[in-house]
Amino acid sequence: MGVEICVEGLTKSFGHQVIWQDVSLTLPAGEVSVMLGPSGTGKSVFLKTLVGLLKPERGSITIQGRDITKLREHDLYEVRKLFGVLFQDGALFGSMNLYDNIAFPLREHTRKSESEIRRIVLEKMDMVGLIGAEGKLPGEISGGMRKRAGLARALVLDPEIILFDEPDSGLDPVRVAYLNQLIVDLNAQIDATFLIVTHDIASARQVPDNIGLLFRRELVMFGPRAELLTSDEPVVRQFLNGRMQGPIGMAEEKDAAQVEQELAQIDDSPRVQELTPRLLPGPGITRPPRWQAIARSEAQLHQKEVAGA
Ligand SMILES: Nc1ncnc2c1ncn2[C@@H]1O[C@H](COP(=O)(O)OP(=O)(O)OP(=O)(O)O)[C@@H](O)[C@H]1O
Ligand SMILES: [Mg+2]
Protein backbone atom coordinates (compact mmCIF):
# COMPACT_ATOMS: atom_id res chain seq x y z
CA MET A 1 0.00 0.00 0.00
CA GLY A 2 1.71 3.17 -1.24
CA VAL A 3 5.26 4.04 -0.39
CA GLU A 4 6.58 6.19 2.41
CA ILE A 5 8.95 9.03 1.57
CA CYS A 6 11.21 10.18 4.34
CA VAL A 7 12.97 13.51 3.86
CA GLU A 8 15.67 14.49 6.33
CA GLY A 9 17.68 17.71 6.62
CA LEU A 10 17.24 18.57 2.95
CA THR A 11 18.85 21.75 1.62
CA LYS A 12 18.71 23.06 -1.94
CA SER A 13 20.54 26.07 -3.39
CA PHE A 14 21.20 27.46 -6.81
CA GLY A 15 24.63 29.08 -6.66
CA HIS A 16 24.54 31.36 -3.62
CA GLN A 17 20.75 31.42 -3.47
CA VAL A 18 19.44 29.05 -0.79
CA ILE A 19 15.92 27.96 -1.81
CA TRP A 20 15.10 26.07 1.40
CA GLN A 21 17.20 24.48 4.10
CA ASP A 22 17.01 21.66 6.60
CA VAL A 23 13.63 20.42 5.42
CA SER A 24 12.52 17.25 7.21
CA LEU A 25 9.17 15.53 6.78
CA THR A 26 7.65 12.12 6.19
CA LEU A 27 5.00 11.59 3.56
CA PRO A 28 3.18 8.64 5.09
CA ALA A 29 2.39 5.72 2.78
CA GLY A 30 -1.03 5.99 1.17
CA GLU A 31 -1.82 9.43 2.58
CA VAL A 32 -2.52 12.68 0.77
CA SER A 33 -0.33 15.63 1.68
CA VAL A 34 -0.55 19.19 0.40
CA MET A 35 2.38 21.61 0.19
CA LEU A 36 1.56 25.30 0.45
CA GLY A 37 3.71 28.39 0.31
CA PRO A 38 3.96 31.82 -1.27
CA SER A 39 5.06 32.00 -4.88
CA GLY A 40 8.80 31.48 -5.28
CA THR A 41 9.37 29.61 -2.01
CA GLY A 42 10.57 26.52 -3.85
CA LYS A 43 7.56 24.19 -3.97
CA SER A 44 8.21 23.15 -7.55
CA VAL A 45 11.91 22.79 -6.76
CA PHE A 46 10.92 20.50 -3.87
CA LEU A 47 8.87 18.21 -6.13
CA LYS A 48 11.67 18.07 -8.70
CA THR A 49 14.13 17.19 -5.94
CA LEU A 50 11.88 14.35 -4.75
CA VAL A 51 11.90 12.75 -8.21
CA GLY A 52 15.65 13.15 -8.45
CA LEU A 53 15.62 15.77 -11.22
CA LEU A 54 17.46 18.24 -8.96
CA LYS A 55 20.25 17.32 -6.56
CA PRO A 56 20.12 18.74 -3.02
CA GLU A 57 23.35 19.91 -1.36
CA ARG A 58 22.56 18.22 1.93
CA GLY A 59 20.14 15.74 3.42
CA SER A 60 18.49 12.52 2.34
CA ILE A 61 15.32 11.29 0.66
CA THR A 62 14.61 7.69 1.62
CA ILE A 63 12.22 5.60 -0.46
CA GLN A 64 11.96 1.85 0.06
CA GLY A 65 15.14 1.87 2.12
CA ARG A 66 17.24 3.72 -0.45
CA ASP A 67 18.51 7.27 -0.28
CA ILE A 68 17.69 8.48 -3.78
CA THR A 69 19.98 11.51 -3.51
CA LYS A 70 22.87 9.03 -3.59
CA LEU A 71 21.70 6.90 -6.51
CA ARG A 72 23.40 6.73 -9.87
CA GLU A 73 21.39 7.63 -12.97
CA HIS A 74 20.64 4.00 -13.85
CA ASP A 75 19.14 3.17 -10.42
CA LEU A 76 17.35 6.49 -10.32
CA TYR A 77 15.63 5.52 -13.58
CA GLU A 78 14.17 2.48 -11.79
CA VAL A 79 13.00 4.52 -8.80
CA ARG A 80 11.38 7.08 -11.10
CA LYS A 81 8.97 4.40 -12.33
CA LEU A 82 7.32 4.58 -8.90
CA PHE A 83 6.35 8.20 -9.59
CA GLY A 84 3.57 9.81 -11.55
CA VAL A 85 4.30 13.50 -11.89
CA LEU A 86 2.28 16.42 -13.16
CA PHE A 87 4.67 19.34 -13.62
CA GLN A 88 3.43 22.89 -13.18
CA ASP A 89 3.64 23.68 -16.89
CA GLY A 90 2.10 20.33 -17.91
CA ALA A 91 5.21 19.48 -19.94
CA LEU A 92 3.29 17.99 -22.87
CA PHE A 93 5.09 17.42 -26.17
CA GLY A 94 3.82 20.15 -28.48
CA SER A 95 4.07 18.14 -31.67
CA MET A 96 2.20 15.08 -30.35
CA ASN A 97 -1.56 14.82 -30.08
CA LEU A 98 -3.13 14.20 -26.67
CA TYR A 99 -3.48 10.46 -27.25
CA ASP A 100 0.22 10.04 -28.05
CA ASN A 101 1.25 12.33 -25.21
CA ILE A 102 -0.70 10.24 -22.71
CA ALA A 103 0.46 6.96 -24.26
CA PHE A 104 4.10 8.10 -24.15
CA PRO A 105 5.12 6.71 -20.72
CA LEU A 106 3.53 3.34 -21.58
CA ARG A 107 5.43 3.10 -24.86
CA GLU A 108 8.64 4.28 -23.18
CA HIS A 109 8.57 2.19 -20.00
CA THR A 110 6.49 -0.92 -20.73
CA ARG A 111 6.17 -3.66 -23.34
CA LYS A 112 2.40 -3.44 -23.52
CA SER A 113 0.65 -4.03 -26.83
CA GLU A 114 -0.96 -1.11 -28.66
CA SER A 115 -4.42 -2.48 -27.90
CA GLU A 116 -3.61 -2.68 -24.19
CA ILE A 117 -2.16 0.85 -24.36
CA ARG A 118 -5.32 2.05 -26.06
CA ARG A 119 -7.47 0.65 -23.28
CA ILE A 120 -5.42 2.37 -20.57
CA VAL A 121 -5.13 5.71 -22.39
CA LEU A 122 -8.86 5.91 -23.07
CA GLU A 123 -9.66 4.92 -19.49
CA LYS A 124 -7.49 7.76 -18.11
CA MET A 125 -8.79 10.25 -20.68
CA ASP A 126 -12.31 9.36 -19.67
CA MET A 127 -11.39 9.82 -16.02
CA VAL A 128 -10.30 13.42 -16.63
CA GLY A 129 -13.09 14.23 -19.09
CA LEU A 130 -11.04 14.37 -22.29
CA ILE A 131 -12.78 11.75 -24.42
CA GLY A 132 -13.16 13.10 -27.95
CA ALA A 133 -10.00 15.25 -27.76
CA GLU A 134 -7.55 12.42 -28.57
CA GLY A 135 -6.44 13.94 -31.87
CA LYS A 136 -5.94 17.51 -30.63
CA LEU A 137 -2.49 19.05 -30.30
CA PRO A 138 -1.60 20.75 -26.98
CA GLY A 139 -1.50 24.12 -28.77
CA GLU A 140 -5.08 23.73 -29.92
CA ILE A 141 -6.74 23.26 -26.53
CA SER A 142 -7.40 25.37 -23.44
CA GLY A 143 -5.00 25.60 -20.50
CA GLY A 144 -7.36 23.61 -18.31
CA MET A 145 -7.53 20.82 -20.89
CA ARG A 146 -3.73 20.71 -21.06
CA LYS A 147 -3.66 20.41 -17.28
CA ARG A 148 -6.07 17.48 -17.41
CA ALA A 149 -4.07 15.80 -20.17
CA GLY A 150 -0.99 16.10 -17.94
CA LEU A 151 -2.97 14.50 -15.11
CA ALA A 152 -4.01 11.58 -17.31
CA ARG A 153 -0.41 11.09 -18.39
CA ALA A 154 0.79 11.09 -14.77
CA LEU A 155 -1.59 8.22 -14.01
CA VAL A 156 -1.00 5.74 -16.85
CA LEU A 157 1.81 3.81 -15.16
CA ASP A 158 -0.22 3.16 -11.98
CA PRO A 159 2.28 5.06 -9.84
CA GLU A 160 2.92 4.37 -6.16
CA ILE A 161 3.75 8.03 -5.58
CA ILE A 162 1.84 10.86 -7.20
CA LEU A 163 3.21 14.39 -7.31
CA PHE A 164 0.91 17.08 -8.68
CA ASP A 165 2.23 20.62 -9.10
CA GLU A 166 -0.80 22.93 -9.05
CA PRO A 167 -3.21 20.50 -10.73
CA ASP A 168 -6.03 23.00 -10.13
CA SER A 169 -4.50 26.18 -11.54
CA GLY A 170 -6.27 27.22 -14.71
CA LEU A 171 -9.35 25.13 -13.91
CA ASP A 172 -12.78 26.62 -13.29
CA PRO A 173 -14.29 26.13 -9.79
CA VAL A 174 -16.56 23.29 -10.85
CA ARG A 175 -13.66 21.40 -12.42
CA VAL A 176 -11.59 22.04 -9.28
CA ALA A 177 -14.38 20.38 -7.28
CA TYR A 178 -14.37 17.40 -9.66
CA LEU A 179 -10.58 17.25 -9.53
CA ASN A 180 -10.58 17.21 -5.73
CA GLN A 181 -13.12 14.39 -5.74
CA LEU A 182 -11.01 12.56 -8.33
CA ILE A 183 -7.92 12.86 -6.11
CA VAL A 184 -9.79 11.55 -3.05
CA ASP A 185 -11.33 8.68 -5.06
CA LEU A 186 -8.02 7.77 -6.70
CA ASN A 187 -6.26 7.75 -3.37
CA ALA A 188 -8.90 5.39 -1.98
CA GLN A 189 -8.73 3.13 -5.04
CA ILE A 190 -5.04 2.91 -5.90
CA ASP A 191 -3.62 3.61 -2.45
CA ALA A 192 -0.77 5.73 -3.78
CA THR A 193 1.06 8.32 -1.69
CA PHE A 194 0.15 11.83 -2.85
CA LEU A 195 1.90 15.18 -2.59
CA ILE A 196 0.00 18.07 -4.11
CA VAL A 197 1.20 21.63 -4.49
CA THR A 198 -1.69 24.07 -4.60
CA HIS A 199 -2.59 27.69 -3.97
CA ASP A 200 -6.23 26.79 -3.51
CA ILE A 201 -6.98 27.07 0.19
CA ALA A 202 -10.43 25.50 -0.13
CA SER A 203 -8.79 22.38 -1.63
CA ALA A 204 -6.09 22.41 1.02
CA ARG A 205 -8.77 22.45 3.70
CA GLN A 206 -10.78 19.54 2.29
CA VAL A 207 -8.53 17.10 0.48
CA PRO A 208 -5.36 16.14 2.38
CA ASP A 209 -4.47 14.15 5.47
CA ASN A 210 -1.44 16.38 5.99
CA ILE A 211 -0.45 19.95 5.17
CA GLY A 212 2.98 21.57 4.91
CA LEU A 213 3.94 25.21 4.49
CA LEU A 214 7.17 26.58 3.03
CA PHE A 215 8.14 30.17 3.84
CA ARG A 216 11.41 32.09 4.16
CA ARG A 217 13.58 29.18 3.14
CA GLU A 218 12.13 26.90 5.80
CA LEU A 219 9.44 24.31 6.18
CA VAL A 220 7.40 26.28 8.73
CA MET A 221 5.20 23.35 9.63
CA PHE A 222 4.19 19.93 8.37
CA GLY A 223 1.55 17.87 10.09
CA PRO A 224 -2.01 16.54 10.16
CA ARG A 225 -4.61 18.70 8.42
CA ALA A 226 -6.35 19.54 11.70
CA GLU A 227 -3.12 20.72 13.28
CA LEU A 228 -2.43 23.33 10.62
CA LEU A 229 -6.03 24.39 10.15
CA THR A 230 -6.30 25.24 13.84
CA SER A 231 -2.74 26.48 14.28
CA ASP A 232 -1.88 29.75 15.99
CA GLU A 233 1.41 30.05 14.14
CA PRO A 234 1.12 33.52 12.47
CA VAL A 235 2.48 32.47 9.06
CA VAL A 236 0.24 29.42 8.91
CA ARG A 237 -2.83 31.39 9.97
CA GLN A 238 -2.19 34.20 7.53
CA PHE A 239 -1.70 31.82 4.65
CA LEU A 240 -4.66 29.55 5.35
CA ASN A 241 -6.91 32.60 5.70
CA GLY A 242 -5.49 34.36 2.63
CA ARG A 243 -4.96 37.61 4.54
CA MET A 244 -2.68 40.60 4.01
CA GLN A 245 -2.17 41.05 7.76
CA GLY A 246 0.71 38.96 9.03
CA PRO A 247 4.37 38.14 8.43
CA ILE A 248 3.99 37.42 4.69
CA GLY A 249 4.36 40.56 2.55
CA MET A 250 3.86 41.17 -1.17
CA ALA A 251 7.51 41.22 -2.12
CA GLU A 252 9.63 41.22 0.98
CA GLU A 253 9.44 40.40 4.62
CA LYS A 254 7.66 42.88 6.88
CA ASP A 255 9.27 44.29 9.98
CA ALA A 256 8.34 42.69 13.26
CA ALA A 257 6.66 45.75 14.82
CA GLN A 258 4.29 46.14 11.88
CA VAL A 259 3.38 42.46 11.97
CA GLU A 260 2.63 42.64 15.66
CA GLN A 261 0.39 45.66 15.18
CA GLU A 262 -1.49 43.98 12.33
CA LEU A 263 -2.00 40.77 14.25
CA ALA A 264 -3.30 42.62 17.30
CA GLN A 265 -6.17 43.96 15.19
CA ILE A 266 -7.63 40.68 14.04
CA ASP A 267 -9.24 37.85 15.82
CA ASP A 268 -9.87 34.81 13.69
CA SER A 269 -8.67 32.21 16.12
CA PRO A 270 -9.74 28.97 14.43
CA ARG A 271 -11.71 26.47 16.44
CA VAL A 272 -11.77 22.73 16.14
CA GLN A 273 -15.58 22.79 15.75
CA GLU A 274 -15.22 24.90 12.61
CA LEU A 275 -12.94 22.46 10.81
CA THR A 276 -14.07 21.71 7.27
CA PRO A 277 -14.76 17.99 7.04
CA ARG A 278 -12.45 16.01 4.83
CA LEU A 279 -13.87 15.17 1.42
CA LEU A 280 -15.07 11.54 1.32
CA PRO A 281 -14.62 9.11 -1.57
CA GLY A 282 -17.61 8.81 -3.91
CA PRO A 283 -20.36 6.19 -3.56
CA GLY A 284 -19.10 2.62 -3.70
CA ILE A 285 -15.48 3.56 -2.99
CA THR A 286 -14.07 2.66 0.38
CA ARG A 287 -10.79 4.01 1.58
CA PRO A 288 -8.80 1.47 3.50
CA PRO A 289 -8.47 2.94 6.99
CA ARG A 290 -5.35 5.05 7.49
CA TRP A 291 -5.01 4.19 11.14
CA GLN A 292 -1.88 6.23 11.66
CA ALA A 293 -3.46 9.33 10.15
CA ILE A 294 -6.59 8.86 12.22
CA ALA A 295 -4.60 8.40 15.41
CA ARG A 296 -2.39 11.43 14.77
CA SER A 297 -5.31 13.62 13.91
CA GLU A 298 -7.40 12.52 16.90
CA ALA A 299 -4.51 13.08 19.28
CA GLN A 300 -4.21 16.54 17.80
CA LEU A 301 -7.89 17.38 18.15
CA HIS A 302 -7.93 16.09 21.69
CA GLN A 303 -5.02 18.34 22.61
CA LYS A 304 -6.78 21.36 21.09
CA GLU A 305 -10.02 20.60 22.87
CA VAL A 306 -8.26 20.25 26.19
CA ALA A 307 -6.37 23.48 25.56
CA GLY A 308 -9.52 25.33 24.51
CA ALA A 309 -11.75 24.00 27.30
N1 LIG B 1 16.81 25.42 -12.43
C1 LIG B 1 16.89 26.52 -11.69
N2 LIG B 1 18.02 27.26 -11.65
C2 LIG B 1 18.12 28.35 -10.87
N3 LIG B 1 17.13 28.80 -10.07
C3 LIG B 1 15.99 28.12 -10.07
C4 LIG B 1 15.80 26.95 -10.87
N4 LIG B 1 14.55 26.48 -10.65
C5 LIG B 1 13.98 27.32 -9.76
N5 LIG B 1 14.83 28.30 -9.40
C6 LIG B 1 14.56 29.37 -8.41
O1 LIG B 1 14.09 28.75 -7.23
C7 LIG B 1 13.12 29.57 -6.58
C8 LIG B 1 11.88 28.73 -6.27
O2 LIG B 1 11.23 28.38 -7.49
P1 LIG B 1 9.94 27.45 -7.56
O3 LIG B 1 9.56 27.36 -8.99
O4 LIG B 1 10.22 26.17 -6.85
O5 LIG B 1 8.88 28.30 -6.72
P2 LIG B 1 7.37 27.89 -6.39
O6 LIG B 1 7.23 27.85 -4.90
O7 LIG B 1 6.98 26.66 -7.13
O8 LIG B 1 6.57 29.17 -6.94
P3 LIG B 1 5.10 29.24 -7.67
O9 LIG B 1 4.08 29.15 -6.57
O10 LIG B 1 5.11 30.61 -8.30
O11 LIG B 1 5.02 28.13 -8.65
C9 LIG B 1 12.86 30.74 -7.53
O12 LIG B 1 13.59 31.84 -7.04
C10 LIG B 1 13.42 30.28 -8.84
O13 LIG B 1 13.90 31.36 -9.58
MG1 LIG C 1 5.75 26.25 -8.65
Image (cartoon, rainbow, N blue to C red):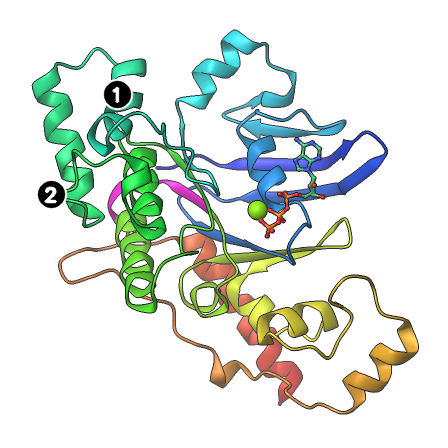
Q: Which residue is depicted at the point 12% across and 26% down?
A: 118
Residue 264 position in % (x across, y down)? 80, 89
Q: Nearer the viewer, residue 66 or 175?
A: 175
Q: Is residue 263 above or below residue 80?
A: below
Crowd around label 1: few <14 · some 14–19 · many ≥20 (10 Å): many
User: Which residue is at the front of the view, 212 or 12?
Assistant: 12
Q: Which of 266/189 is in front?
A: 266
Q: CA distance from mark 1 to mark 2?
A: 20 Å
- Rendering coords of residue 147 (x, y %): 35, 46
| Residue corresponding to mark 2 | 132
Question: Type of residue at label 2?
Answer: Gly
Q: Which residue is disc 1 drawn over?
A: 106
Which region is colored magenta? 189-195
Numbered circle sitting on residue 52:
none
Residue drawn at x 49%, y 52% is 33
Residue 192 forms part of the magenta stretch = yes
Secondary structure category for the residue under label 1: helix
- Work out which quarter of the rendered image holds the N terminus and state it: top left
**Element on which disc 2 rests:** loop
Position above or below: 151 against 202:
above
**The C terminus appears in which quarter of the rendering?**
bottom right
Disc 2 residue lies near ligand 2 with CB under 8 A: no
